[in-house]
Image: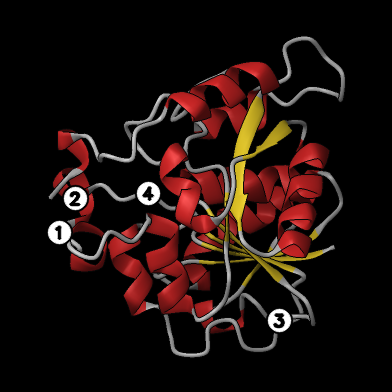
Amino acid sequence: MKIGIIGAGNIGGNLTRRLTALGHDVSVANSRGPHTLTALAEETGATPVPVEEAARGAEIVVVTIPLKRVPDLPSGVLDGAADGFAVLDTGNYYPRQRDGRIAGIEDEGATESRWTEGHLGHPVVKAFNGTYAQDILDRHRPAGAPDRIALPVAGDDAAAKARIRALIDELGFDTVDSGGIDDSWRQQPGTPVYGLRAGVDGVTEALAKASPERPADFRG
């Protein structure tokens, strides 16, 4: 599968490593330019590209950048993607630690991924936002393994969600459908499922315990 990854930090870099190891054709981009991705490309076989070209021909586009940088993405950043492509959003809102106050989230009550979706102009599927980056490399397990971790996955587009869930399964993790993007507050920072290493039952229980009130540490 052709996959474009926008963002080469901890999550983006480790997804690049695993997806190329599984045989996918990965293009990866960051804000500093493809010349800064030489080492990752040599390690993985991924193709470093400018951000404007990351989605070209991609069946899945992964957006894994700081939330405050989403509005800075080039206009038409998803142009040229394959028909029916899905967007995987791994982002989180950290107003005090990194992003500053975002009015669309704080004042208008949008979930983080709904806000991101509005800037991208395309539906997104939220996953990996509460996953430790190193777990992508170290904690993948075959289907049915008793210690296989499950990840919550939110999204409105059933076909896109199914495609992302299938990819996560291939990466070695179970999934739990956590609802639509307006329900994705259940997996935002500060919720019981955020950072949880548990199977399907544990993740399902944690999602049910979530409160829609954003914790003080994650409010601007």
Q: Do the residues bearing badges 1 and 2 touch, measured as CB atoms within 8 Å?
A: yes
**Residue 141, horizontal then vertical, whole percent:** 78, 22
Question: Along the polypeptide, which appears first: circle 4 or circle 3?
Answer: 3
Residue situated in front as seen by the camera: 110 or 43: 110
Query: Residue shown at 34%/33% (left/top)?
Result: 211
Between circles 4 and 3, the one closer to the viewer is: 4
Question: Along the polypeptide, which appears first: circle 1 or circle 2?
Answer: 2
* As drawn, 143 above or below 152: above
Separation of residues labelled 1 and 2 (CA atoms): 5 Å
Between circles 1 and 3, the one closer to the viewer is: 1
Residue position for label 3: 81
Q: Dot 1 surroundings within 10 Å: few (below 14), some, or many (20 or more)? A: some
Residue 18 appears left or right of 40: right
Residue position for label 4: 92
What is the secondary structure assignment of the residue under circle 3? loop
Separation of residues labelled 1 and 3 (CA atoms): 31 Å
Residue position for label 2: 95
What is the secondary structure assignment of the residue under circle 2? helix
Q: Amino acid at mark 4?
A: Asn
Query: Residue shown at 78%/63% (left/top)?
Result: 159
**Residue 162, horizontal then vertical, whole percent:** 78, 53
Q: Dot 4 surroundings within 10 Å: few (below 14), some, or many (20 or more)? A: many
Question: Along the polypeptide, which appears first: circle 3 or circle 2?
Answer: 3
**Residue 133, horizontal then vertical, whole percent:** 52, 35
* Disc ID at residue 111: none
Q: Amino acid at mark 2?
A: Pro
Q: Do the residues bearing badges 4 and 3 touch, measured as CB atoms within 8 Å?
A: no
Can residue 48 be seen by looking at this rendering? yes
Separation of residues labelled 1 and 4 (CA atoms): 13 Å
Q: Dot 2 surroundings within 10 Å: few (below 14), some, or many (20 or more)? A: some
Residue position for label 1: 101
